[in-house]
Image (cartoon, rainbow, N blue to C red):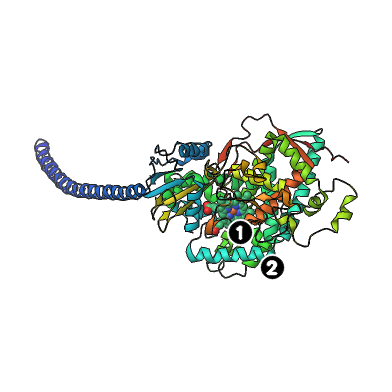
Amino acid sequence: HPEPVTSHRTAPRASSRARAMRSSEVIGNLVNAFDVASNASTIAAVALLGIFTLGLFFILFVRARARATLARASVPAVTWRPKFLWRLYSRSARSLLQRVEQRFRRGDGSGRGRRAFGAVVGACPFVHVGEARLARDVLRETSRKAPLYHAFEAFSGTGIFTAEGDDWDGKRTEVLRAFHDVGLASLRDRAVEESASAVEEMREVVERGGGEIEARALPILQRLALRVTFAYLTGVSLRRACEDVGRERSEVEGEYLDAATTLRHLIPARARSIWIFSDLLYGLTPVGRLEARKIRTTRSLSALALRTAKEESPLGRLRVGEAHLREKSIKVGKDEYPKGLLDEATTLLFAGHDTQSATLSWCLLRLVQDVEVQSELRASLRDDIIEEALGLPPSKSGSRQRRSSEKTTKPAWATSAFAPTLEAVIRETLRLHPVAPLVVRMLSSDTHSEKMTIPKGCAVGVWLSSVHRDESVWERPEEFDPKRWFGGPAHARTGSMGGSSNDDDDNGGILTPSRDRSNALRHKGVGYMPFAYGPRSCVGQHLAQVTMRVALAHLVHAFEFAPSADLDASMPSVGFTVTPSTGAPVRVRLAARAPA
Ligand code: HEM
């Protein structure tokens, strides 16, 4: 056998030397590597620190600039704290409107009674306004919405609610022209049809319930307002459109309203939270993903509306208008739709049903608190001309045929002078519950008013709910008093509303003389703007007034409403619109027949 290369005794000595050498090499290499790494990490750390410091200086600089701009408005400043979305969403800011109003009432301590305060929101100087005249000046001045509306873009896309500049201008013109060309008669007919059928459904439930039931009014009114809005926009009833695609109307409505309810809270909550700063990060959060799912659901109703819309309907007209066809198409299910058109249908369906159902819910809650007003309203509707015009069943047999020859050829029901008590109740509801209570604009030039100047570059949040409570304009502002819309200045401070008026600044120019001039309503005046004011005021206000008149008249004509046992019934839930937080629970019974 050959000798082993290393003897048994020398081998460990040689290998330990080699090991020692190898380990010193390794340590040396490690030290080198560590040196290199530590140099690199030092450089990276210094670079990061530099970027961080620069970023910090930049933030401090823009915030200081924003504070300086705000100081020029000389409003008392409050601190803005961004919120975490899940807290806002889960608690749905109940008392927000009261808190803001209290803040306005406190003023700036100067005794000048300014209803305004400011905050730096991110890097933007933000002035909150609750003063009637100032609000009007601001809203008249600009058509630019604040970056806050960015949170709504995922939902309403480039529809007119969120569009800007020439794009908005072109689309708004097309929408208004479409509404004008179609006219209000078809809307009145749809509203009569759907209101009568909602009353019949409810009558059956009341009769089954032994003559009186407790019901949540909001979901019933949401379905009613959605059906009227869909039918008007498309020229086809929602039932018919659903049948055409082999689906049940109640299922389609249910899905849509569930999604809309979630979005109503989620989108404004995002606008007030830190997530407004990043679409990408927001999209990765569970709430961001929930929002995307709900938006897809609402779009399927918009797609159904576009697919079924008749040529002569408002959506049918938009389908051939240029402004809505410029953008590329997007897919919903198997079909593709021009994005601008789809976004507009989404905007109008949502804005149409949500605002009207919320307003009508508040109206019923007010009427259950004020039985006298409710009875007066019901009595005022038991008039054969009003009944005929609003499609109500006749309460006195035999009289209609005789009087119908007096029917005016103009759409009298479209004017506020036609049924003044009904109109006064709706106006007073919208005064105390303007369901879209905050509108925000960017000032592109300084806005001067009697009391102050707000510099350009400021975002201005006009709180319509507070404008409607401005004590320099309204007497007893918290009181629900439809009578303030009639008669002399006892009900409103001088200058707030002018003399009596039949001029209907809200009726789209359709003028019909009142049948009873002594009963004419007063001008709305400077302190009243439930549909906002100026270039970006509501495009659907004339539609809303017709639908709400018809729907409220049908409900109050058929039923008596009484308060429910729910103590939270009048608690507001503030989202996209302000709704009664527990769905407007009321007790319902059939209205007693009119005395012969
Ligand atoms: C009681 C009913 C309604 C109320 C109280 C109401 C209130 C308002 C308010 C306050 C604005 C301004 C929002 C802002 O600038 O942030 C607005 C805008 C708008 N409303 Fe209404 N609205 C009602 C009904 C309707 C209806 C029935 C439609 C359509 C079918 C509609 C469509 C719109 C649209 C598209 C805008 C955006 C206009 C623009 O930015 O140019 N609204 N509404």
Q: Which residue is mark 1?
A: 345
Q: Is residue 502 above or below residue 567?
A: below
Q: Is residue 92 in sight in this rendering?
A: no
In the rendered image, which quarter is residue 218 located in?
top right
Q: Cβ–Cβ below 8 Å for labels 2 and 1? A: no
Q: Residues within 10 Å of mark 2 (few under 14, many from 20)?
A: some
Name the amino acid, label 2.
Glu
Alpha carbons under labels 2 and 1: distance apart: 15 Å
Q: Nearer the viewer, residue 577 or 99?
A: 99
Which image quarter is the N terminus in?
Answer: top left
Left or right of 65? Residue 421 is: right
Q: Residues within 10 Å of mark 1 (few under 14, many from 20)?
A: many
Where is residue 498? Give x, y as percent.
60, 51
Which image quarter is the C terminus in?
Answer: top right
Q: Nearer the viewer, residue 96 or 330?
A: 96
Q: Secondary structure under badge 2?
A: loop
Q: Nearer the viewer, residue 412 or 236?
A: 412
Instruction: Tell which circle, 2 or 1, labels the residue nearer the N-terminal end.
Output: 2
Q: Is residue 125 in sight in this rendering?
A: yes
Identity of the residue drawn at 56% across and 68% down? 325
Where is residue 544? Give x, y as percent.
65, 53
Left or right of 230? Residue 446 is: left
Q: Give the total number of marks visible in the rendering.
A: 2
Left or right of 102? Residue 70 is: left
Residue most extreme to the right: 398
Name the amino acid, label 1.
Ala
Q: Which residue is mark 2?
A: 311
Where is residue 574? Give x, y as percent.
55, 41
Judge: label 2 CB < 8 Å from ligand 1. Answer: no
Residue 322's label in the rendered image is none
Where is residue 390? Give x, y as percent.
77, 52
Q: Secondary structure under badge 1?
A: helix
